[in-house]
Amino acid sequence: MHSTLAFVRDAQADRADRTDRLVTHRSANRLADDPSIADFRADRIAGDTNARSLADLPSAQSGAAARVDGAFDTLEYLVGVNLARLRAERQFSLDALARASGVSRAMLAQVESARSVPSIKVLCKVAAALKVSVSAFLRRHAVSGFEHLPADRASRRVSADGRYSARALYPEDGPAAAEFHELRIAPLHTEPGTRRAPGTTVNLVVSEGTLEVSVHDRRQLLATGDAIVFDADQPHSLRNPGDTEARVFRVTLNAETPPRWAVPLAGEIRNAGDTRPAASVQPI
């Protein structure tokens, strides 16, 4: 007779094999565009361990998005989807990737199904086997591996007089460590810059025309092909001194903002003779 534990293990192995076959035999593009995969990951994050085939997943779509909550759940989902996509693109089975990376098949299956977040050491091993950077597992555009930004649908900010415009060349759906814009400045127009947080750096390169950059009381004239880097927490402005439109590319590296921490009040600090656990310091 089989023990209860044996049946549980058999069911888990069967589910892992079905998922492995589906991920391995689908092309990377189909995997990227298949909403059932995303719903499957979200469902596993919610802790649903019922044996279900991917064909059954559309019935659970309505509640999947609401269940992807919390930073750690999102991280599990992101790493899992990325691993599944990268493995499919390279046509690795779970067993093949386990042999190439030295990471067990069971661990890889848990990561892909968003049941655990691997350590940095494990991620490094898997990344080396897949020939990618560790950061590839943390990309927010994970499902497709890239994000197309058509010029005709790009976000563009235009000044009231229409003589200055900035087009975003990066996804603006959330906070970004770096921002990339295309600027167009009409002849003889001056555009005041927005002062940013200390530690923010701006890098400009002139693609067409000329540009005069003023930082405090210092001015620098840039010709086509010239570049400049300056701290964006200073007063600055951009002026086109020419008689043709200037085209400039701007990269903004945002300052690192460490998390704020809730410091215990004086009355909450444990006395020397108090044996109760000290209050933990939590980010807010």
Image: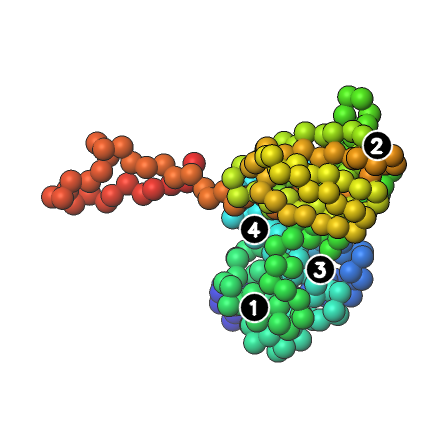
Q: Residue at x 80, y 42 (%)?
A: 210
Sequence-wise first label, 4 or 1: 4
Q: Which residue is mark 3?
A: 85
Residue 200 percent location from the top left of the image: 57, 42
Sequence-wise first label, 1 or 3: 3
**Closer to the eye: label 4 or 1:** 1
CB contact under 8 Å: marks 3 and 4? no
Answer left or right for 263 relative to 20.
left
Tell me how many marks there are. Answer: 4
Measure the alpha-carbon separation of dots 1 and 3. 17 Å
Q: Secondary structure at mark 2?
A: loop
Residue 75, label in figure = 4
Residue 171 percent location from the top left of the image: 71, 42
Q: Secondary structure at mark 3?
A: helix
Amino acid, disc 3:
Arg
**Closer to the eye: label 2 or 1:** 2
Q: Residue at x 61, y 54 (%)?
A: 138
State how the image is colored.
rainbow
Q: Which residue is mark 2?
A: 187
Residue 278 percent location from the top left of the image: 25, 43
**Closer to the eye: label 2 or 4:** 2
Measure the alpha-carbon separation of dots 3 and 4. 15 Å
Residue 124, label in figure = 1
Measure the alpha-carbon separation of dots 2 and 1. 51 Å
Measure the alpha-carbon separation of dots 2 and 4. 47 Å
Amino acid, disc 4:
Leu
User: Observer-nearest residue: 50 or 273?
Assistant: 273
Answer left or right for 77 relative to 159.
left
> Mark 4 packing: few (<14 Cα in 10 Å), some, or many (20+)?
some
